[in-house]
Amino acid sequence: GDEVLIYDTSASALRKMTRTNFVSGISNTPIFRAYRNSSVTLSSGTNTIVTFDQENIDTGSMYDTSNGKFTPTEAGKYYVFAMVSWDLGGGINYVELRKNGSNISSNYTNISSLASGRYVFHIHNIVEADGDDYFEINVYQGSGSNKTLHSGTSNTFFGGYKLVE
């Protein structure tokens, strides 16, 4: 099997561990990933908090499918990511990662020359959470008409996990 050598400075010696024993204490949990199961109409000129209403995984019961909030249950640093897509009609469009209701990261575009087509927004960040914070995804589309936020596990999702420190 796989073995890992570790130098023990207190004993001035090499120690052997199996790979399984070495990595057993390393875990990026809690972890969650949720997605939008059905399409949502995005009104032009309106901020919309996306509620990802289905979960793929949620080991720490950190995500609430009823309100779209990721509330880390343990203090620490988290890698948070999301992808959303909708059909554009030009204008200003963006997606924001919000912490406690305030924007902390955004993906913004002004596509006035693009009259139609699907646009995919990605957002990711490493965030600090103290156990009382919450995170959510806000979207805005400014085409002048309503647009449809695409649904499905591969089109519109939100996730995160605690980083090993």
Image (spheres, grey):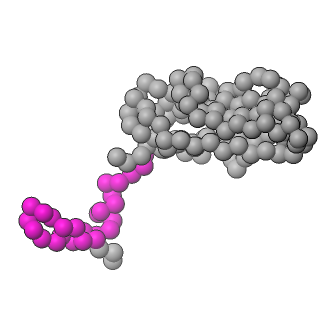
Query: What segment is highlighted magenta in the picture?
Result: 4-31
In the image, 114 versus 25, the foreground residue is: 114
Residue 55 at x, y = what percent?
A: 60, 41
Q: Residue at x 49, y 30 (%)?
A: 71
Whether residue 59 can be seen here: no
Q: Residue furthest right?
A: 115
Residue positioned 62% across, 42% down in the render? 123
In front: 94, or 79?
Answer: 94
Residue, x 43% and y 32% (percent of image)? Answer: 129
Q: Does the magenta run of residues contain 2?
A: no
Kindly identify the residue that appears in the image at 75 percent across and 42 percent down: 85
What x and y, as percent, mark residue 38? 76, 37
> What is the quadrant of residue 110 in the picture?
top right
Q: Nearer the viewer, residue 38 or 117?
A: 117
In the image, residue 155 lies at what x, y percent? 73, 46
As drawn, the residue found furthest toward the left would be 11
In the rendered image, which quarter is residue 157 located in? top right
Tell me if I can see residue 67 in this picture.
yes
Q: Quadrant of the N terminus?
A: bottom left
Instruction: Please give left or right for residue 34 compared with residue 4 in the image.
Output: right
Residue extending farthest bottom: 1
How many labels, in total?
A: 0
Q: Position of residue 12 (x, y in %)?
A: 10, 68
Q: Is residue 129 above or below residue 11?
A: above
